[in-house]
Amino acid sequence: MPERQGGLSGLDAFVHSDRRGLLDNTSTAKTEVTATVADRIDPIRIPRGIPMNARRKVAYALASAAAMTATLFATAAPAQAYGTLDVRYARVDTDNCNRLSGTLAITPATGGCYLYDSLDDTYFEKDADGEALKVELRNGGTLVSKVEFHPNGEKLWIYDPAPDGDTVYVRLRTATHGWSAVFYATGAQNPHVIDFDFAEGENVLVEIYDKSDATDRIASFWARA
């Protein structure tokens, strides 16, 4: 399989929030919706008898409150949550392509292991002492997300193939680096590839969530760089 391109390099994934992911998308939504509300808000009628400077203050306060309300709604994305998903996975020994746990089928190949799927398949390159992870998430039989951790190069791959207005969120944790930022796939970054810089043999906890604030965990797995 040709090598995939793209990603966020180094420890920036742990130090900074995803520049082209969650926070940037939210910030854009805030700007656009706030401007729209300010442009379209109906003229505010203030009863006569109130001094002009007081009338201006009241009008400004009401307009600001309306814009703030719209901004709060804009940042609460996505609009729905999956609820219960069918989770299938495999943890793979990248020394020999043995399945360490899970049920997904593994096919040994020259230089690595294939795990086939209906999207674009998965190929884990051989990596001494590495433990790869592939997770498929289905909603009513439809593949709605795929998450992979590749020990060779320490890369996290997140797919969102279903145009259903929802997505899953992923973060990693290691003893050395702590928690990473929360990542997800959307738009031009689909799949979203994040490049980490873990030490060889470092254990990596991969957690998948239904909400962007990482409070509604779907599943968690261990892998090894």
Image (tube, rainbow, N blue to C red):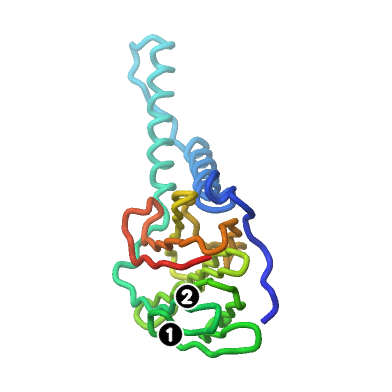
How many residues crowd around disc 1 within 10 Å: few (fewer than 14), some, or many (20 or more)?
some
Q: Which residue is mark 1?
A: 104
Using the image, determine if residue 118 lies above or below residue 145. below
Using the image, determine if residue 35 lies above or below residue 139. above
Q: Residue furthest left?
A: 84
Identify which residue is drawn at 57% across, 68% down: 191
Looking at numbered disc 1 in the image, what kind of residue is underneath it?
A: Leu
Identify which residue is drawn at 48% across, 84% down: 98
Q: Which of the 4 quarters of the picture holds residue 135?
A: bottom left
As drawn, the label of residue 134 is 2
Q: Position of residue 203 (x, y in %)?
A: 46, 62
Identify which residue is drawn at 49% across, 39% down: 34
Q: Position of residue 185 (x, y in %)?
A: 53, 63
Q: Are marks 2 and 1 in contact (CB under 8 Å)?
A: yes
As drawn, the label of residue 3 is none
How many residues crowd around disc 2 within 10 Å: few (fewer than 14), some, or many (20 or more)?
many
Of marks 2 and 1, which one's residue comes earlier in the chain? 1
Split into 4 quadrants, where in the image is the N terminus? bottom right
Identify which residue is drawn at 38% across, 31% down: 65
Q: Which of the 4 quarters of the picture holds residue 151?
A: bottom right
In the image: residue 20, left or right of residue 85: right
Q: Position of residue 55 (x, y in %)?
A: 40, 16
Looking at numbered disc 2 in the image, what kind of residue is underneath it?
A: Lys
Total numbered labels: 2
Q: Position of residue 68 (x, y in %)?
A: 41, 36
| Mark 2 and mark 1: Cα distance apart in space | 8 Å
Label 1 secondary element:
loop
